[in-house]
Image (cartoon, rainbow, N blue to C red):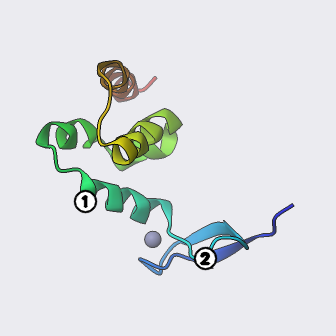
């Protein structure tokens, strides 16, 4: 089993991140997401992904979609559709 320990985020030097000994550096969730925001150039996608930070934190699906967009540079119609649906549900508080 890998040893896990807490390390201060190298970007903001504010939050602690749980890392394994294999990881060279730690970047906290917030900084990761900020980094992604900076890389979203398409205004349509920017608008789509511009939802409250806590939604991403609470919902793994939304966070994964965002990460997917960054990785592949696009999302399928289906992904966008489901993304919107989930955001709507979260706005209603379910
Ligand atoms: Zn950070």
Say left or right for 93 vs 26: left
Front residue of 50/40: it is 40
* Residue 90 - label: none
Sort mark 2 into few (<14), some (14-19) or many (20+) by Cα contacts within 10 Å.
Answer: few
Front residue of 51/48: it is 48
Q: Position of residue 47 (x, y in %)?
A: 18, 39
In the image, residue 9 sits, relative to residue 63, either above or below, namely: below
Front residue of 42/94: it is 42
* Residue 24 - label: 2
Q: Secondary structure at mark 2?
A: loop
The single residue placed furthest to the front in the displayed view is: 72
Q: Secondary structure at mark 1?
A: helix
In the image, residue 24 sits, relative to residue 78, either above or below, namely: below
Report how far apart the C-alphas of labels 2 and 1 lie in the structure.
23 Å
Quarter of the figure with residue 88: top left
**Image-quarter location of ligand 1:** bottom left
Q: Position of residue 40 (x, y in %)?
A: 23, 50
Q: Earlier in the sequence, mark 2 or mark 1?
A: 2
Q: Which residue is mark 1?
A: 38
The answer as to whether callout 2 falls within 8 Å of ligand 1 is no
Say left or right for 24 vs 67: right
Quarter of the figure with residue 80: top left
Sort mark 1 into few (<14), some (14-19) or many (20+) by Cα contacts within 10 Å.
Answer: few
């Amino acid at each position: 089993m890998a040893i896990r320990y807490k390390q201060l985020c190298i970007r903001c030097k504010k939050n602690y991140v749980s890392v394994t000994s294999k990881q060279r550096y730690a970047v906290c969730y917030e900084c990761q997401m900020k980094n992604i925001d900076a890389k979203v150039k398409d205004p349509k996608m920017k608008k789509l992904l511009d939802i409250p930070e806590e939604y991403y934190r609470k919902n793994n699906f939304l966070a994964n979609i965002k990460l997917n967009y960054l990785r592949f540079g696009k999302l399928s119609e289906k992904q966008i559709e489901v993304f919107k649906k989930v955001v709507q549900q979260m706005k209603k508080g379910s």
